[in-house]
Amino acid sequence: MDEEKKGTGKKLNRRDFLKTTGGVAVAGVAAGGLFAAPRKAFGADMPKKWDEEADVVIIGSGFAGLAAAIEAKQAGATVAVLEKMPVHGGNSIINGGVFAVAGSPKQEAEGIQDSPDLLLEDMMKAGLYMNHPELARMIAEKSREAAEWTESLGVEYKERVTHLGGHTVPRSYSTSNGSGSAIVNKQYDKLKNMGVKIRTRTYVSAIIQDKDGRVVGVKIREGYKFPEEGSGKEKYLKAKKGLVLASGGFSRDIYFRTLQDPKLTEDVDSTNQPGATGEVLMEALRVGSTPVQISWIQLGPWTSPDEKGMGIGYVFNAMGGFVYGVMVDPKTGKRFINELANRKIRADAIIRTGHPAVCVADSEGVKRVPVLDKTLEKGVVKKFDTIEALAAAYDIPVKELKETISNMNTYIKQGKDEEFGRPMQTDSKPIQSPPYYACRAWPKVHHTMGGIQINKEAQVIGLDRKPIPGLYAAGEIAGGVHGAVRLGSCAVLDCIVFGRIAGKNVSA
């Protein structure tokens, strides 16, 4: 560290080096053992005076943050929930509202055999066995408890479970309105009734530690106007018991995501809300949190290129075309992948074709698509009286498309997909009942699997391999739970389980 700062003639010491290069540098040097046992990383300086205080400070107002807030408040703590955007909910409020639950009453009613062990096996297989087993097992074993907790808040789910890609059996609950808002708004109502107000337009610019490395508060900007850097009034908020990071991922941080995967340039759209820009992750790294699998970034295979962001076409593809229909390459009219493989397998397969795929279902196959009318109204899903008309609209070879559908009908009747091994639903019917429906599919950046290391108690682990005192995390900011690929509907589960754990432990 004796190099001179370029153009200054000053020596570059270790503290300056870390300030200059940030959390990414910390991640790199950690593996080399530069920090044998750091007592305090390089957080913001302690203020001379705190402007206000709370027992527990929570950053983020999605599933995880709100779950943590409810548990902390119920434990008797005073709670401050900070949200940088103008409205609460983050990505959770635009989430698809599907929740993986193993061994649920809904499955039992349908005669579906399932268990936490099977869910764990599915998660590990999809994650290429890169999942941290103790974290993955935690959410699998607590899935039923987590769902019942949301129901105790008044969340309503549809009677039947959904079969999403990568899952061995149908196990995913679907909210009554087909959106994560059904969960978020009940959490919000619970907090409001307990006297906790979510502080929107509040940007966290620094995490503050004391001389021993304990997290004791945050520096914030109140009245922040996204994305105006430096907007808002600066204040210091003390966290007497601790801080919970529940700020989500970085799918909208084009610079940082491209640093991890150069293919994910600004030309690749994202399903995330605009505020998923990862500043809190960067701050967590800066104060010495251990990075985990940050370069593993998931693309959703069901999104449509005919609308911006998450949109609503994905609902048709995920609950209609992939489950009860077929996905074809419009150039060939043929299937090219198991429509219920995990997200990475499907997204990679679509990208390899070099153009959007087309998902097709008939009037029977769309009966469980909750927002079909809205997708048609928006024009992202189109309706046709005949297969010939559908093929013409998407320039698909009609002979080959008919052959593909005929083959699938055979597989449905025999209960076995001889081409790609797609699981067949017990209520599947041959694709032969007009009208027919279609939607294009092209992957978008959806979920960042990596983040900072946590343990089963939701404590953030530092570069000295020990918990950072006073610091907890839950949800997408925490890495290791999902490994290389997150299974659909496991995000809500992850957020609720670890959000509740973090809220209980930080307030203890």
Image (cartoon, rainbow, N blue to C red):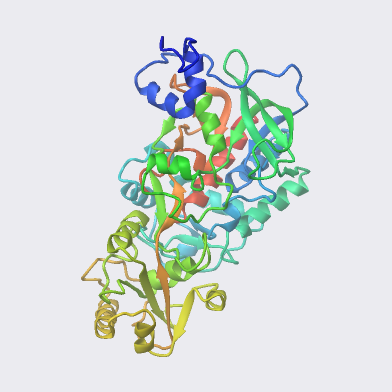
Most foreground residue, 77 or 279: 279
Measured as percent of width and height from the top left, residue 71 is found at 65, 40
Q: Evaluate whether residue 385 shows in this view.
A: yes
The furthest residue to the left: 418
> Splitting the image into 4 quarters, where does residue 470 fall?
top right
Residue 200's place in the image compared with 433, above or below, is above
Would you say residue 137 is visible in this rendering? no
| Residue 415 image offset from top left, x and y in percent | 28, 74
Q: In this rendered view, identify the residue nearer to me: 420 or 273.
A: 273
Q: Residue at x 70, y 38 (%)?
A: 231
Residue at the image position 32 percent from the left and 62 percent from the top:
350
Residue that appears at 67% across and 50% down: 88
Tell me the quadrant of the picture where the C terminus can be found. Answer: top right
Q: At which x and y percent is residue 426? A: 36, 73
User: Image height check: is 488 above or below 136?
Assistant: below
Count the numbered circles shown. Answer: 0
Q: Locate the N terminus and report the quarter of the image it occupies.
A: top left
Q: Position of residue 119 (x, y in %)?
A: 39, 52
